[in-house]
Image: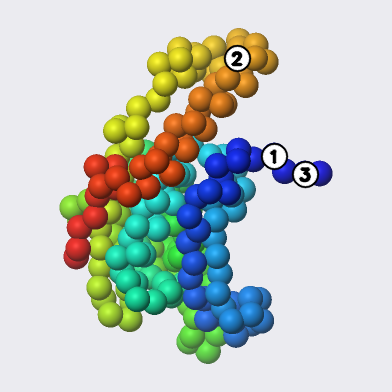
Amino acid sequence: MQENFPQFFNDVAPIILYDPLAEILGSVKGGIIKFNYKQIVKAAGHSCPTVAGAYLTCKRALEVLYPDSLPLRGGIQVEFKDSLTQGVTGVISNVISNITGATKESGFKGINGNFARHSLMDFGVAIDLHVRFIRVDTNASVQVAYDPSCVPPSAKLQALMPKVMSLQASAEEKGEFGKLWQERVKKILIDNAKNDKMVTLKQG
């Protein structure tokens, strides 16, 4: 069965990393892994401003931490200001974990002391912005905050929300709701990918 995603998913810039574990185990020749937004949507089960923001947050942070080389998957520590259960932190952390390989206690324990992925993610950390990415090899770090309020939803989308959520919307209204919802996601991922008002970065 053919998948039918919005076309703009294909236009979102990918995130490319080097994963030494994948190379050693023969999972990916050369260890080069490319994540695209469509893969993240499949893992999350949906596309929304939160999932899009988590993807952009990760991409922008890795560009700062690795200006001259591919990010090292499994070599990145991630810290969140909020607790795991607060707001949408869990959704965001799942997206970032998929990309970076970082987990709290549940991740891969490693092989002979190498390639461990557990204990690389923590929550409720005293930082200024929403999330901090740290290179394990150099201890260089960058904090990131994400605020999509500069890309407001359509007024029509807001009007349709109660009908859709109460299961009172017609098929046409549901289709229009989904279209408008993804139009906002597109504006976030494509039109505002480099908008510093939406994604704020701070060294350290």
Q: Amino acid at mark 2?
A: Glu
Q: CA distance from mark 3 to mark 2?
A: 24 Å
Q: CA distance from mark 1 to mark 3?
A: 6 Å
- The reply to whether callout 1 and callout 3 are in contact (CB within 8 Å) is yes
Which residue does the image show at 60% across and 38% down from the upper left? 6
Which residue does the image show at 40% across and 58% down from the upper left? 59
- At mark 2, the secondary structure is helix
Residue 16 appears in the figure: yes
Q: Amino acid at mark 1?
A: Asn
The residue carrying mark 2 is: 173
User: Residue 136: which quarter of the image?
Assistant: bottom left
The residue carrying mark 1 is: 4
User: Whole-percent x and y of residue 41?
Assistant: 57, 46
Residues packed near mark 1 inside 10 Å, few (<14), some (14 to 19) or many (20 plus): few
Is 188 or 170 nearer to us in this picture? 188
Which residue does the image show at 43% across and 44% down from the upper left? 189
Q: 168 above or below 132?
A: above
User: Looking at the rendering, in which quadrant would you find the N terminus?
Assistant: top right
User: Whole-percent x and y of residue 34?
Assistant: 55, 65
The residue carrying mark 3 is: 2
- At mark 3, the secondary structure is loop
